[in-house]
Image (cartoon, rainbow, N blue to C red):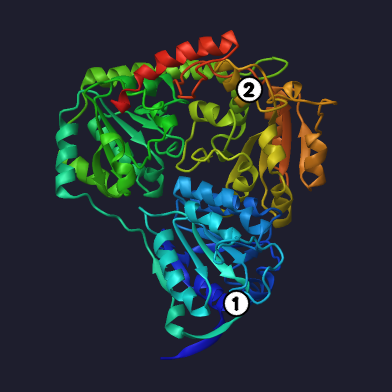
Amino acid sequence: MTTIRLTMAQALTRFLSRQMTVIGGQKMPIFGGVWAIFGHGNVAGVGEALYQHRDTLPTFRAHNEQAMGHAAIAFAKASFRRRMMAVTSSIGPGATNMVTACALAHVNRLPVLFLPGDVFANRHPDPVLQQVEDFGDGTVTANDVFRPVSRYFDRITRPEQIMPALQRAMAVLTDPADCGPVTLSLCQDVQAEAYDYPESFFAETVWTSRRPRPSEDELAAALSALSKAEKPLIIAGGGVLYSGATETLRAFAEAHRIPVAETQAGKSSLPADHPLNMGSIGVTGTSAANELAEEADVILAVGTRLQDFTTGSWALFQNHHKAIIGLNTQPFDATKHRALPLVADALAGLKEIALGLGSYAAPDRWTKKAEDGRANWFKAADKATAATNAALPSDAQVIGAVQRSLGDNATVVCAAGGLPGELHKLWQAGRPGSYHLEYGYSTMGYEIPGGLGVKMAKPAEEVVVMVGDGSYLMMNSEIATSVMLGLRLTIVVLDNAGYGCINRLQMATGGANFNNLFKDVRHEVMPAVDFVAHAASLGALAAKVASIADLETALGDAVKNDRTTVLVIDTDPLVTTEAGGHWWDVAVPEVSPRWQVNAAREEYEKAIEAQRGLD
């Protein structure tokens, strides 16, 4: 056996540089690079190793470890999980800064390789700088917080352990069912230790998509239910996009005349102008989709984990005789709420269902209801997004301006606050992947580094980031990174002077306006953040616009700029789109000295009776 003597860190980077994938017939590295902020836990070992492979495994530096994770996750999502990135940090706060990003990837089933530095395996210098000590367990380190939010976790305490760890890591990162974040915690002394590694370990490996087919029994049960359906509905989740099943979904819906509703992760599975696309479903759903969901007798849930925003906290599906078919690669998701499981790849599963259904088509009266509901919804949506001369425009009106200016050519990126709900309802996505929302973990601060990751995955496309002032203030450092890397973004900051979304939720549950909008926060001086000056200080071109018309003009100019542009507009914190939507289970206190809370509790108790999905 031929061997090569390398440090553990050198073996790690050499291995990563030899992992490949095939997209559109073209072989390319599966890792788009490594995000790194160096410190005493990784600069000597991993840092030196990355330098040796800087041409085949490029290294990128950001300004915040959590942001690096977000950018890597967005890259994987925009690549439909076919490519990914790694992220490395020092020990201590550098490592734990990444835990939120790891949880985001875990919830959203997205592949990213986290490589935090760790303590000395030999324990000679303990406690080292930034080491967290457990008085009762000598094996515990700060990196143990990654365990519950990683699909696979390993701590490398000997140099040869990196070989099985990396093989297991790649199996998880590329598996459609188990896909999610992997954390390899790298003891800093072991990073620098040498070992005679087999050269075969570094052989080029090509990872392709696995497409599991449904079992005969599960397929038969699904076909039996669908073939009798009078009111069928398809829910398209992110799995449709990750499977590359968008055209298959279109053909399936058209052949069987079944309307389609989309989750946040699944939006853009069908073009918005497709006559069978009812738009978003659930709490932030369109009236067209939700009216069908209330009556549907068979729901084919494709590639979705059916979280509460999709199901209206399981109060949306009101047909007592309904059947849910869970078409998903992951049995955990396929069997939720007594669904008929159909464990399979979305593309393969849809093809086999189509063969079995033959000439079945939904009844004309059901299709007509869908058409009428869709037409009514578009009237409401057009009204909500129309430009006005209001002193403070709504989020919907800003969305309308961005859609009219950039929508046909841009990928929109967003994550948290009120904007995701409005975008889910109102954004008209034309191409698969042109709608990029992180709403599984709803992470404030994802937006700008997420936009950076999308741009890295799709450098030729326009990427527009829509972000509220609250999320901007939480994470804005990667504006500087976008300028440094020459990755031009258009960032629209909607300033409603606080956390407008949560303020509205607070009011809806009977709460007093408290601690959300700046005016209701304990303060001596009212904040007056100059977002334009701040963005300009990070190297961006920046301007504040006074109206929707000015915003549209500025957006048209922004695409001609040579670097990231930040446009700021003041918005109304209280106005939201009234059309569409559905109840969401947010528990209201049973007792309160305030009549408003007691009244909200009465309404809440009535609403929870509708949670038919829990029958």
478 vs 524, left or right, is left
578 or 597: nearer the eye? 597
User: x, y (%) of residue 406?
Assistant: 60, 35
Q: Is residue 179 above or below residue 533?
A: below
Which quarter of the rendered picture does the N terminus lie within? bottom left
Q: Nearer the viewer, mark 1 or mark 2?
A: 1
7 vs 551, left or right, is left
Q: What residue type is disc 2 on?
A: Asn
532 or 471: nearer the eye? 471
Q: Which class describes the residues within 10 Å of circle 2: few (<14), some (14-19), or many (20+)?
A: many
Q: CA distance from mark 1 to mark 2?
A: 51 Å
- Which residue is disc 2 drawn over? 503
Classify mark 1: helix, strand or loop. Answer: loop
User: x, y (%) of residue 534?
Assistant: 80, 40
Q: Is residue 379 above or below residue 13?
A: above
Q: Is residue 256 above or below residue 190?
A: above
Q: What residue type is disc 1 on?
A: Asn
Question: First in sequence: mark 1 or mark 2?
Answer: 1
For image coordinates 24% across by 23% down, the residue present is: 231
Q: Residue furthest bottom?
A: 1
Classify mark 2: helix, strand or loop. Answer: helix
Q: Residue furthest front?
A: 136
State the mark number for residue 216.
Answer: none
Quadrant of res 497:
top right
User: x, y (%) of residue 289?
Assistant: 38, 24
Quadrant of res 59:
bottom right
For image coordinates 41% across by 26% down, the residue present is: 312
State the mark number for residue 122.
Answer: 1
405 vs 265, left or right, is right
Q: Which class describes the residues within 10 Å of circle 1: few (<14), some (14-19), or many (20+)?
A: few
